[in-house]
Structures are given as C-alpha cells and as structure tokens.
Amino acid sequence: MSSRDAHAEGPDLAALARLLADSTRAAFCLALLDGRAWTAIELARHAGVAASTATEHLNLLVAGGLLAQERQGRHRYVRLADPATAELIENLASMAPRRAAPPHSLPAVNRSRALARARTCYDHLAGALGVAITTAMTDRRLLDWEHGLTLTGNGTAWLDELGITLPPGRWRPPVRSCLDWTERRPHLAGAVGAAVCRHAFDSGWITQIGTSRAIALTDTGKRAFRDHLGLSDDWSVTDPRS
C-alpha cells in the first residue's frame, strides 16, 4: 500500500482542521456556543464581515457537519450540529493561544471577565462557576473520576431530590468532561450538565447578562448553590480530578 493510499483511508482530520483554520468560521463557531440559532446576518455583524461572505463560510460549515441549519420562511438559521460539536469547539478553545484584549478597551475587558466567571457552554455551565460546581459535586461524591467520569448513586439521588430529570433515551452520555477554555480545568457536560443548567435557569438561580453567554448568580442562586453544594461566593476551585 502506498502512502497516498494509506492517507485516503479513515477519518479526514485535515478537512475538519481546515474548516476551523479560518478566523471568521472559528468566530462563528465560538459565537454559536451560546446554544442559540443565529441568522447569517447576525453572524456577519458579529464577525464584522459582509453577509455574502458569511453565507459562503456557513455553507462550508454546514457541509462539513459542524453546523445544522433550518429554514423558517425566507430566513435560514444555523446552530452547532450537536452537543458533541459544542464540546469539541470548547476543548479546542482551551488549547488555543489567548488573544489579548485591545488596549484601553474597558468594555472588552469586562466582557472577558464576565465570561470567565460564569457562562454557558452550549447547554451546560462553564467558567469558574461551572468548574466550581463540578468540583463540589466531586467532593460530595456525586461524581467519580476513578474510572472515567461517572455519576454515582449519590449523584442520582441528589438529582432526584432537586427534581432534576434527565431526558429519555441514550443518545447522549449522562456525564461528560468538557475542558474549560478559561479555567483550563474540566467542567460537567453531558445530559446531567445540561439538566443542571436548565434547572438553574428555570429556578431563577442564574440569569443571562445581556445577549452574551455570560451569566450571573442571583441571590436565590447563591443560597441554592450554598445549600445544595456548599458553594461559596468566591468559587475558589481546584482540579476535581485531583
């Protein structure tokens, strides 16, 4: 077998890398981590490119399987293809070099700090808050890392006590580790991570800051996380796997 034949077999990782090698397409994927569906015009404005340019990039991302699209009338909406794609983007972001905020840009600095403190990562919690929750669940033996991340029996009972139910079916693993791109430590993803995030929003524990992915804890949320997980306001965390 020639080296050319060998390269023709198996997954085409280079094709996936090429999709994300363009800064505009990468910016689109990062923006879509908020879990919402965006129009091409919205993404064009976000990335600072022409609508026609955005459409070309979106067509490539949809054809490459990173984005899914749906049409409502004359409008086309795109979103990340699935939770696994969102976790892939978040993991890649955690490995990417950091770009400094523009000098003297206080709004940019504040946005960056808010995202690092607490945000959504597609449909689960991330940032310092997400890592702190994962650490607290590990400390209370709701999660176990010995043989890969698993939800313990105590964890299942804890979810039941809070009234958190998981969606039926097994299309998605119950728990999954997602490497946080700001904390560089794992936060909880998977069906449990999504359910905890949804419960926090529905119960008024967290609220979205503007239209960004950044979130803030409400007073109710501070009490809830303190009562249910012993979480302090400073969210000082260590690696949950240690």
Image (cartoon, rainbow, N blue to C red):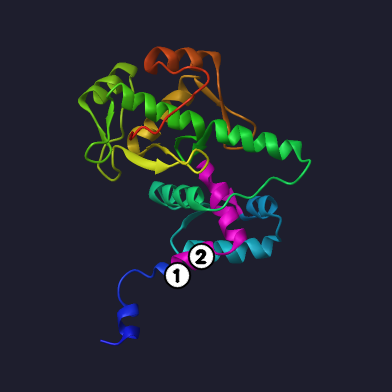
**In this view, 69 is above or below 129:** below
Residue in view at x 47 percent, y 51 percent? 89
Magenta extent:
16-39
Indicate yes or no whether the magenta region holds residue 26: yes
Residue 25: where, in percent of width, then height?
57, 59
For the N terminus, the quadrant is: bottom left
Residue 113: where, in percent of width, then height?
62, 34
Q: Which residue is mark 1?
A: 15
Residue in view at x 40 percent, y 12 percent? 227
Q: Which residue is mark 2?
A: 19
For the C terminus, the quadrant is: top left
Residue type at mark 2: give it.
Leu
**In this view, 231 is above or below 173:** above
Q: Is residue 120 visible?
A: yes
Q: Hey, which quadrant is residue 172 in on the image?
A: top left
Q: Nearer the viewer, residue 14 or 73?
A: 14
**In this view, 7 is above or below 180:** below
Tell me how far mark 2 sits from mark 1, CA to CA. Answer: 7 Å
Label 2 neighbour load within 10 Å: few <14, some 14-19, many 20+: some
**In this view, 63 is above or below 48:** below
Residue in view at x 34 percent, y 25 percent? 137
Residue 54: where, in percent of width, then height?
63, 61
Circles 2 and 1: CB atoms closer than 8 Å: yes
Q: Is residue 73 visible?
A: no
Label 1 neighbour load within 10 Å: few <14, some 14-19, many 20+: few
Residue 241: where, in percent of width, then height?
33, 35
Q: Helix, strand or loop at disc 2?
A: helix
Residue in view at x 62 percent, y 55 percent? 40
Q: How many marks?
A: 2
